[in-house]
Amino acid sequence: MAKAKENLIKMKCESCGRVNYWSHKNKRKVERKIELKKFCNWCKKRTIHKEAKK
């Protein structure tokens, strides 16, 4: 179970700055920060969510 927590990353909304999502990332294959377009419950619209620091 400890291995799964190592790959866990936070996804932070670009417009309001809140952490809305948690995701997994293969750090050996993906070296850059992940950007996904997700729905933000506080902004009430689809915004870009970027990987945040732990």
Image (cartoon, helix red, strand yellow):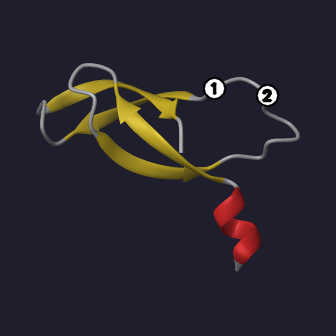
Checking the image for residue 31, the label placed there is 2
Residue at (80% x, 42% y) in the render:
27
Task: Kindly identify the amino acid type of the residue bearing the numbered disc 2.
Answer: Glu
Q: Nearer the viewer, residue 22 or 38?
A: 22
Which residue is denoted by mark 1 in the rendering?
33
Q: Vertically, is 33 above or below 54?
A: above
Percent x, y of residue 15: 24, 19
Task: Kindly identify the amino acid type of the residue bearing the numbered disc 1.
Answer: Lys
Q: Vertically, is 16 above or below 4?
A: above
Residue at (64% x, 65% y) in the render:
5
Q: Quadrant of the N terminus?
A: bottom right
Label 2 residue SS: loop
Local packing at callout 1 (Cα closer than 10 Å; few below 14, some 14-19, many 20+) is: few
Q: Vertically, is 41 above or below 7?
A: above
Label 1 residue SS: loop
Name the residue at the front extreme.
54
Give the distance between the C-alpha atoms of the residues marked 2 and 1, in whole angstroms. Answer: 7 Å
**Looking at the image, how many numbered discs can be counted on the residues?**
2
Percent x, y of residue 49: 40, 29
User: Quadrant of residue 45 in the image?
Assistant: top left
Left or right of 32 in this view: 36: left
Percent x, y of residue 53: 53, 36
Left or right of 38 in this view: 6: right
Percent x, y of residue 28: 88, 41
Q: Vertically, is 5 above or below 11?
A: below
